[in-house]
Image (tube, rainbow, N blue to C red):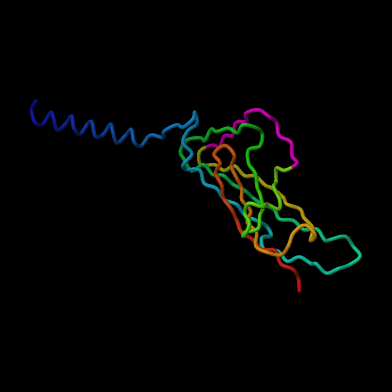
Amino acid sequence: MPKQKWLRMYELTLLVVFATLLLPFPSNGQESSSLLTYSLTAKPGNLQVNRMPGTNPPRSYQETFSFVVKDTKRTDYKGSASSCKTFDVEVAPVDTPDQPVWVWSKGRKFCQHVTPVNIPAGQSWPKTAVWKFTTADVKDGKYRATATFIPENGKTSVDFEITSVQ
């Protein structure tokens, strides 16, 4: 085989190998989600609560968690969850993360069938969870909210602090 023909064949083989590496690889019937990004915000975030005694019931407060999954790929994300529970949010003290004080899904009922979750290319999938609590429910301290995107078990978190008015 002449040297030029061999060199051309070698270049063509490298090109095919390189192009193959650039293609997304499916996993478990779903396309690769390595380019999904997750963000979580808490409003109001750091919170001062009034624990002054009075004749009224304990005061009520709330944290609103905004969870966003963004598909940064050029192709649509097509995933699924094993039930209608497609995300969850839990709040736990930073120093005891295995002891949540609140879980969004706790006490909720979810359908028990596979639920598709589709995110168009370049778009976001926003969800909101609201934690309502009283001063009797939580202690002062640092807390971490963790949101989970069920189809990929993708997680993100945000820290905030609850303090008492002095």
Residue 114: name its quadrant: top right
Give left or right: position of 56 versus 144: right
* Quarter of the picture holding the C terminus: bottom right
Give left or right: position of 18 versus 119: left
> So how many labels did they put on this image?
0
Task: Report the residue at 53% width, 32% height from top.
Answer: 78
On the image, the x and y values in percent for residue 31 come to 47, 33
Task: Report the residue at 89% width, 67% height from top.
Answer: 54
* Quarter of the picture holding the N terminus: top left
Residue 107: name its quadrant: top right
Give left or right: position of 98 versus 154: right
Q: Residue furthest top?
A: 1
Q: Residue furthest left?
A: 2
Residue 13: name its quadrant: top left
Does 58 appear above or below 39? below
Task: Report the residue at 18% width, 29% height from top.
Answer: 9
- For the record, the magenta segment spans 107-120
On the image, the x and y values in percent for residue 156 come to 56, 50
Does 56 appear above or below 129? below
Does 76 appear above or below 144? above
Q: Is residue 144 magenta?
A: no
Q: Residue furthest bottom?
A: 166
On the image, the x and y values in percent for residue 66 come to 64, 50
On the image, the x and y values in percent for residue 130 come to 72, 50
| In the foreground, 24 or 99 | 99
Main secondary structure found in the magenta portion: loop
